[in-house]
Image (cartoon, rainbow, N blue to C red):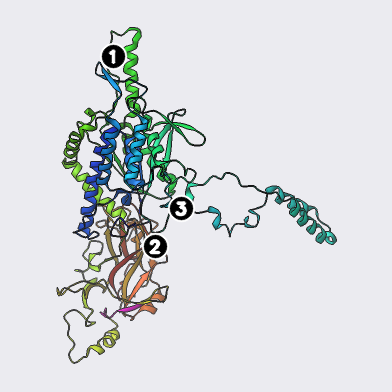
Amino acid sequence: MNHTNHEMNPHAPLRLLTLDGGGVRGLASLMVLDDLMENIAREEKRLGIRKRDDQTRPKPCDYFDLIGGTSTGGIIAVLLGRLQLDVRKCIEIYTKLAEQIFKRDRSITVGGMKLPTGSTRFSGAVLEKAIKDALKELGHDEDTTMWDDSLFEEIDPLADTKDSIWVDHLNESPTVIRSRTATAATTTAESSLEHSTATVKSTDTAHKPHRASTWKYHSGACVHRRPNRRGCRTLVVSVLKNALGLPRILSTYDPNDRTTCIWQALRATSAAPTFFEEITFGTPKMTYLDGGMGFNNPSAEVAYAAKSIWEGRNIGVIVSVGTGLQTIPSVQKHAAWLPFGLGQDISLASALASMATGTARVDNEMQRMYYDSPTKYYRFDVDTGLADVSLEQWMKEDEMASLTEQYMGDPRQLRHAKRLGELLVQLSALPPKFEVRAEDFKIGMAGADVSAGAFEWHDLDFKTGFALGLRAQGISPEQVPALAALRSTSPSGVPGLAVDTTGVARAVLPVAQDLDRDGRREEARVATCVRADVVCLRMLRTRVPQGRYRVRFIVCFFDTEHTPPVDVVFSAGKPSDTVAFLRRFVDVRISPDIGPVLLQPDAVRVRVGTERWEEKKGRSWVEIEGDEEVQVGLDGALGIVVSRRFEEGVYVGGWSFGGVRLEPVFV
């Protein structure tokens, strides 16, 4: 099922969404997400990725690779991730669940405190029934499993072992291999070699052990999304009753757990002491408690899970949404009148309980971990009023909505939501091909080489093959290409020819522009090197989607009375200093080679040698392309430099530069 009207980037940096626990205040989390999805749709329309009249709502499962939550956040994570709902539908289901679960409160109020009349205030059976009813309402079986067989498939890691040195022994016992090796080693007599080999083979056949099928551990790395399927991975965080302090992850992608039902996982992550009964299930039987017992903010667990699933893949953004529990706990003044120091013990226990369910500590750790990092960390947490809404007060929906709307309307949050929407669209959309015009380059160390006569701007008309505005009298259109091709001392508007690796030919022209303002891009402005002692053209692009790109430099070579463009180097890569890249002055007498000063060492560099120049000279426009693709990182910065090692008294000419074309490469 296609949830979006455009193609998504399958190799985008990881996008993670984490959802805190907090009872009915999860409604505030959903309202924050609804606002973020609106920002995404608005940005897609601005960029032309989404049609302006398209009113379909973006789904979080299309814009995040992993959604994880604890307690009420776990319920929301499953609705958005495993069941692939949009936020508005999720709000509808969630509010029904909250009313069904919390309307029957089995407690009494004593001294302003709610005390359960039984073991818990609310019924786990009611929670289970509400979840099953929601599943059936959405068209699923009530025992639908967390493992998502429609989205994921397991690929046998042994399928790609044909090149292994052990391929001939995969079905043999190590004992047999050692036995055969030892027997062969003791057979030294030349005359008995054939007999010994036959004996060994016979022994192998007779004593080869039968390997019965046993329980097999399935690595998470062998789980892959099925072709042409949209969706994301989902997890919920719980803890084991007998192993408090350690998270227990229940996910949709664990190949070793294909039996846990959705309702069981949600009961496990919601089994908060005094609120709901604990739940026991699985083989072997294990007892689960609410993940809020230490992991109410699951950001660190979701980030670790992502690193475990996608080893070596960058995390682009982490979005953490809270439920108003950001207060840092403290030990309050105790009741001095209580005997035996009970007042102090009660205050300390209350502080420890708040510490276990609080979220500020994890938020602080995440901010420090990703400070000044390419990974962007966003935290949204309604900071006023929600703490006064108890975890079970489902009837205060209007109050929660008002507080959340007020929070997201704050100028600071408006800016954050807008930036996040732009970032998610940038990371999610398929990287486009793009071009850079020659006139976008800064020419010369101080940007004045054109006015100084080292370079000249030439405007070309693709329709005539000559300079823009030039009309050749008495020449038929059929004669224009032949005449333009005869020119040997200036750039031509006639296309060159390139043949790709598949044998398909294509025309090569400078990056096109609409210079005559006729509404058609059939002209180009190119930079022609006339007489330059210092060759330095540079350009910076930011917000380029992460990935690998094939870079093609568009160049035209022709005769010159000066030194030909041999040893001109075309470079592309990460700038050494993005801020100072365009204005940095390099003293060529100290650093003759400009490229390595401006770009980092892993930049792709292509040199024009004598053979290449002789071969391409006079052939109109050609593409200069390296053997490697350029890698753009999470910061989205790409620097391009055209330079030549400085030599005192040497002046270069005989070439024109028509811009750069970049094409994303998908492996």
Callout 3 amino acid: Glu
Residues under labels 2 and 3: Cα distance? 31 Å
In this orientation, which residue lies closer to the viewer: 172 or 53?
Answer: 53
Question: Of the residues under marks 2 and 3, which one precedes in the sequence?
Answer: 3
User: Measured from the top left, where is residue 473 in percent x and y?
Assistant: 17, 90
Look at 52% across and 35% down and name the residue there: 284
Question: Of the residues under marks 1 and 3, which one precedes in the sequence?
Answer: 3
Quarter holding residue 593: bottom left
Q: Is residue 556 left or right of residue 398?
A: right
Residues under labels 1 and 2: Cα distance? 66 Å
Callout 2 amino acid: Glu
- Dot 3: element: strand
Q: Is residue 197 above or below residue 22?
A: below
Q: Is residue 321 above or below residue 4?
A: above
Q: Which residue is mark 2?
A: 629
Question: Badge 1 local density, few (<14 within 10 Å), some, or many (20+)?
Answer: some
Question: Badge 2 local density, few (<14 within 10 Å), some, or many (20+)?
Answer: many
Q: Is residue 241 visible?
A: yes
Q: Is residue 166 left or right of residue 325?
A: right
Q: Which residue is mark 1?
A: 334
Q: Is residue 496 magenta?
A: yes
Q: Which residue is mark 3?
A: 153
Q: Is residue 169 above or below residue 242?
A: below
Q: Is residue 56 left or right of residue 181?
A: left
Q: Quadrant of the C terminus?
A: bottom left
User: Measured from the top left, where is residue 62 in percent x and y?
Assistant: 32, 52
State the extent of the magenta-drawn residues as a range.
490-497
- Dot 1: element: loop
User: Measured from the top left, where is residue 338 in percent x and y?
Assistant: 30, 9
Callout 1 amino acid: His
User: Measured from the top left, where is residue 322 in percent x and y?
Assistant: 28, 36
